[in-house]
């Protein structure tokens, strides 16, 4: 018997889950896979297979010989392309679908809300919350919930930091490749331009921060990592153009 075709909403939900889960968790025993399967009336093995098909479209995995199940359909490719072309709108839509099925809820580790413009006052908080939740979960999953500088792995101390500022680059607000998983301290330094990364993803300190590292805490938190490359994720590696933009427009050289 032919399997039931996946609807567009189902594919959007699968892509959302693909973004929010570490690659090694795409299996039918994963509770999130089971929850999505139950919500859309499919088997966990079917959802796990769909995640594998989406993985086959990921350039990072293709370059390294990880080809998933090589069964990606035309619909899979269309949703993959749509997400990558319109991260914010698809992030919001996918989170709305999750909420409608009871699959999403606020967590104690969500990030503080940032300023947002473009929608009405009624729409703004909702879109901010959904876009930020998707972005945070996708970035933390990519980095396996570890600060890419220090390795700190306590979610309450981690921020999905935007490389291109949220306010100036609406097209990349929910793009996981515009994210770094940083501790709250390093996120603040990065956001203020006190810290940056070069083309090899090595930490660079501004003169202002470097001069302040006579303090033991700052020395331990920054000086020891200066010149060292960050721990890059298996998926959604930070876009080199975004890193360069931060270095030239935000970093206090």
Image: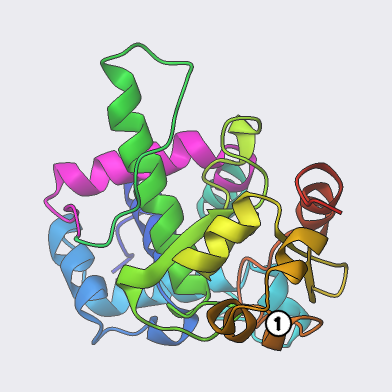
User: Looking at the rendering, which quadrant does residue 173 occupy?
Assistant: top right
Q: Is residue 153 left or right of residue 217?
A: left
Q: Nearer the viewer, residue 185 or 166?
A: 185
**In the image as oriented, which residue stretches furthest toward the front?**
214
What is the span of residues highlighted in magenta in the rendered image? 83-107
Q: Which residue is mark 1?
A: 223
Q: Position of residue 18 (x, y in %)?
A: 44, 66
Q: Nearer the viewer, residue 65 or 171?
A: 171
What residue appears at the point 67 percent right and 45 percent down from the top-left corner? 164
Q: Nearer the viewer, residue 87 or 154?
A: 154
Q: Is residue 18 visible?
A: no
What residue appears at the point 17 percent right and 56 percent down from the top-left corner? 103
> Which structural element holds mark 1?
helix
Q: Is residue 117 left or right of residue 212?
A: left
Q: Is residue 246 left or right of residue 35?
A: right
What residue appears at the point 18 percent right and 45 percent down from the top-left corner? 99
Decide whether residue 91 is among the magenta residues. Answer: yes
Name the quarter where the C terminus is drawn: bottom right
**Is the magenta region chiefly helix, strand or loop?**
helix
What residue appears at the point 31 percent right and 45 percent down from the top-left corner? 95
Q: Position of residue 91 (x, y in %)?
A: 43, 43
The vertical placement of 24 against 238, above or below, is below
Query: Counting other residues with Cα less than 10 Å from the Cα at mark 1, is it few (<14), some (14-19), or many (20 or more)?
Result: many
């Amino acid at each position: 018997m032919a399997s039931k075709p996946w609807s567009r909403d189902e594919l959007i939900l699968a892509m959302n889950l693909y973004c929010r889960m570490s690659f090694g968790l795409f299996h039918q025993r994963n509770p999130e896979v089971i929850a999505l399967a139950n919500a859309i009336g499919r088997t966990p093995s079917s959802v796990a297979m769909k995640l594998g098909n989406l993985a086959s479209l990921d350039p990072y995995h293709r370059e390294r010989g990880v080809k998933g199940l090589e069964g990606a359909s035309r619909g899979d490719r269309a949703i993959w392309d749509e997400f990558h072309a319109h991260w914010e709108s698809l992030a919001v839509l996918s989170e709305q679908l999750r909420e409608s099925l009871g699959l999403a809820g606020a967590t104690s580790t969500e990030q503080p809300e940032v300023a947002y413009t473009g929608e009405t006052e009624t729409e703004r908080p909702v879109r901010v919350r959904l876009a930020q939740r998707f972005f945070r979960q996708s970035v933390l999953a990519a980095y396996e919930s570890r600060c890419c500088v220090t390795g700190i792995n306590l979610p309450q101390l981690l921020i999905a930091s935007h490389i291109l500022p949220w306010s100036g680059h609406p097209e990349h607000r929910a793009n996981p490749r515009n994210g770094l998983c940083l501790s709250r301290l390093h996120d603040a330094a990065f956001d203020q331009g006190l810290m940056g990364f070069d083309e090899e993803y090595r930490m660079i300190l501004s003169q202002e921060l470097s001069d302040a590292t006579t303090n033991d805490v700052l020395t331990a938190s920054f000086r020891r990592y200066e010149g060292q490359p960050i721990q890059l994720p298996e998926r959604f590696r930070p876009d080199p153009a975004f890193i360069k933009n931060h270095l030239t427009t935000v970093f206090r050289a």
